[in-house]
Image (tube, rainbow, N blue to C red):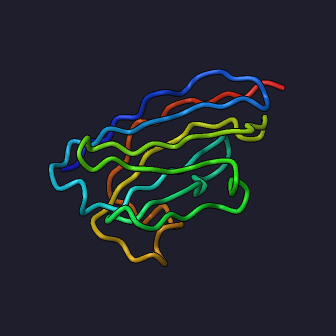
Amino acid sequence: QVQLVESGGGLVQAGGSLRVSCAASERAFSDYTMGWFRQTPGKGREFVAAIRWSGGNTYYADFVKGRFTISRDNAENTVSLQMTSLKPEDTAVYYCAANYRMRAADYVRFRSYEYWGQGTQVTVSS
């Protein structure tokens, strides 16, 4: 069982930056693909970004390309999402997700992830 704990959410003005992080309990963390999803009331979970289990490849939703950066530290068992040029429409609960050595084709599907954190609120004011 992999436990994921997010941190770093908060309130920021439009155009600002925020970093959310996720700490994983799994000692074999480097074997897990890590993803970030977000959710707003009344909507399903939306793919934001993912990083391959080996850490070499990253994937982004079109609406965050050039603004968000996903990274991982396998020595510290953490994955982070650096968010810049934030917009009010980025307001959501952000979730960290994980699964063992996923295929790239599955990264954008929330049902492909087995483990989830509790979520952290990110609010961008206009």
Tally the marks. 0
Q: Residue 7: x and y, percent?
A: 43, 29
Residue 91, image quadrant: top right
* Quarter of the C terminus within the rendering: top right
Residue 30, image quadrant: bottom left
Judged left or right of residue 95, residue 83 is: right
Specify the farthest residue to the right.
126
Instruction: Identify the residue at horizontal 15%, vertical 49% (top origin).
Output: 27
Instruction: Identify the residue at horizontal 50%, vertical 63% (top origin).
Output: 58
105 or 77: nearer the eye?
77
Q: Residue 21: x and y, percent?
A: 43, 36
12 or 73: nearer the eye?
73
Position above or below: 79 against 56 = above
Instruction: Identify the residue at horizontal 58%, vertical 22% (top origin).
Output: 10
Q: Residue 2: x and y, percent?
A: 23, 48
Judged left or right of residue 112, residue 19 is: right
Q: Residue 59: x and y, percent?
A: 55, 65
114 or 75: nearer the eye?
75
Instruction: Identify the residue at horizontal 26%, vertical 44% (top origin).
Output: 77
Position above or below: 65 against 125 = below
Judged left or right of residue 86, residue 54 is: left
